[in-house]
Image: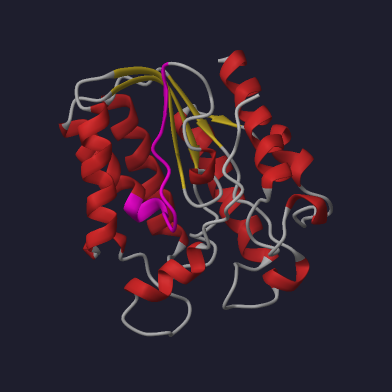
Amino acid sequence: MHPLNPVIIVSKSVVFLYTASFKFPPKDRLSSTIWWRRVIRNQIRLTQNQQYNVGLFGDSMTSPLKNSLGQDTFNFAITAMSTRSLVEQLEVLVNSQVKLQTAIVAIGTNDAWYDINDETFVELMKQAAYLLRLMAAKHIVLLPAFYSSAAAANNPFRAGTVARIEEINELLRQVAVAEKLYFASREMQVLFENQVLKANYTTDGVHLNASGLETYRQILLQLIDTR
């Protein structure tokens, strides 16, 4: 078993650091921040001209897993990411000649919270699929956006609403059909109950605790095996 970092990175706190104001819903402006550009530069340093069986992309739900999915995998997830910053990240990685056989994309949770319309979300997801294929990805797996606790979903300062998560997941499903991607909705359901993140998998209602991360890691390992 790979040890997981139990420290939860609270992406909502990071959002406050780079948004121009505390207005809600916030926008994704990660690419304008110094810390995000430093993370991207470090990813380039580690992965330039490299080939991986699996590349994992996502936000603060996925970044705490670090590189715990075995050899020939790389976790590109960064806290606070959305489809907008994902596309910006992928453009850099394409230019760095990073190659993948399988890409697992866990994005959309922050899109359900950020200010983004449906048309833009779909356009960015399709662009992400195009860029992943430029990275030689033969298999692209989309994960659904994560539900939060009922309390967090009803607090606009903490998470997207259940209704918006549902809308984002339907858009992801549509993109998966249009782009011939695999939408791993069924596999992820073990983390949720009645559109709520299970209480034993979270301490703050938004992010996964150590138990949730291990369950999530096992889901990803099974997806990798089936690819």
Magenta range is 72-85
Q: Quadrant of the C terminus?
A: top right
Report if residue 43 is visible in the image. yes
Question: What residue do we see at 77% from left, 68% from top?
Answer: 150
Report if residue 185 is visible in the image. no
Q: Give whichever of 21, 108 is nearer the camera.
A: 21
Residue 89 in picture, x, y percent from top left = 28, 44
Question: What residue do we see at 57% from left, 78% from top?
Answer: 157
Q: Give whichever of 199, 180 is nearer the camera.
A: 199
Q: Give whichever of 182, 63 is nearer the camera.
A: 63
Question: What residue do we see at 52% from left, 45% from top?
Answer: 64
Vertical placement of residue 63 versus 56, above or below: below
Q: Choose top left, top right, bottom left or bottom right for residue 199.
A: bottom right
Q: Quadrant of the N terminus?
A: top right
Residue 71 in picture, x, y percent from top left = 46, 16
Q: Is 1 covered by the magenta stretch?
A: no
Q: Is 83 covered by the magenta stretch?
A: yes
Vertical placement of residue 34 versus 5, above or below: below
